[in-house]
Amino acid sequence: MDSVDTLKEKIDVRALELKVPPLLLTAVFLAAIVAVVFVFPALVFPIPYSRYMSAGLMLAGVSMLLGAALQFRLHHTTLDPRNPAKASKFVARGLFRISRNPMYFGMALVLASVTTWTCNALGFLLVALFCLYLTEFQIKPEEATLEALFGVDYRAYKSSVRRWI
């Protein structure tokens, strides 16, 4: 059986790096989470107080997403995740003190909210796959670019703040 590294060598996974805008990816996973409810109704199970939990997750997710986007705007740096080389500075204040990727974490919380609302067991797996995809094909390439752009300052930030939370 091939190792993951050998498999990566056989398949040029770099072709997927920074290609799919995270908001589009979120929409695709959101549609998949909702579709699973109809395709696999046996995987829907009751979650006590799911509507309240879902509302809290949605509020937290949207707040993180919009709050982090606002911080980017206030610091006059790019919101375009497909070209991190356009970043004029990296933001290390506010939400970025607790997560290097609060926008992506907010997107994951929105997906978790919909999964909780629909009481969908497979949806939680889809949320995990969303996070894995983003980490490999969006976050790691962004980090490499930011490290090249901002050097020791970004490395210090990276060593003191977690990738997700």
Image (cartoon, rainbow, N blue to C red):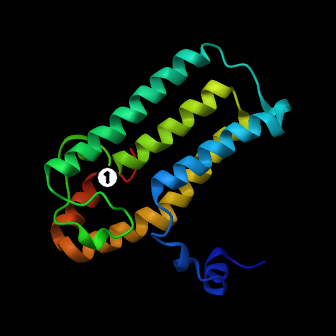
Side (left or right) of 136 relative to 158:
right
Name the outermost residue toward the bottom.
10
Q: Quadrant of the C terminus?
A: top left
Q: How many C-alpha atoms fall within 10 Å of the one at disc 1: few (<14), some, or many (≥20)?
A: many
- Using the image as rendered, state which of residue 107 and residue 6 is in the foreground: 107
Question: Is 136 drawn above or below residue 9 in the view shown?
Answer: above
Q: Residue at x 68, y 45 (%)?
A: 32
Q: Quadrant of the N terminus?
A: bottom right
- Using the image as rendered, state which of residue 28 and residue 161 is in the foreground: 28
Q: Quadrant of residue 80?
A: bottom left
Side (left or right) of 86 relative to 109:
left
Question: Is 74 drawn above or below residue 52 in the view shown?
Answer: below
- The image position of residue 25, as x and y in percent, is 54, 54
Question: Is 23 drawn above or below residue 107 in the view shown?
Answer: below
Can you see residue 125?
no
Question: Is 28 drawn above or below residue 84 in the view shown?
Answer: above
- The image position of residue 74, as x and y in percent, is 14, 48
- The image position of residue 50, as x and y in percent, is 61, 18
Side (left or right) of 82 relative to 43:
left
Q: Quadrant of residue 132?
A: bottom right
Q: Which residue corresponds to mark 1?
A: 100
Amino acid type of the residue tagged 1 in the rendering: Arg
Count the numbered circles shown: 1
Q: Residue at x 58, y 77 (%)?
A: 13
Q: Quadrant of residue 66?
A: top left
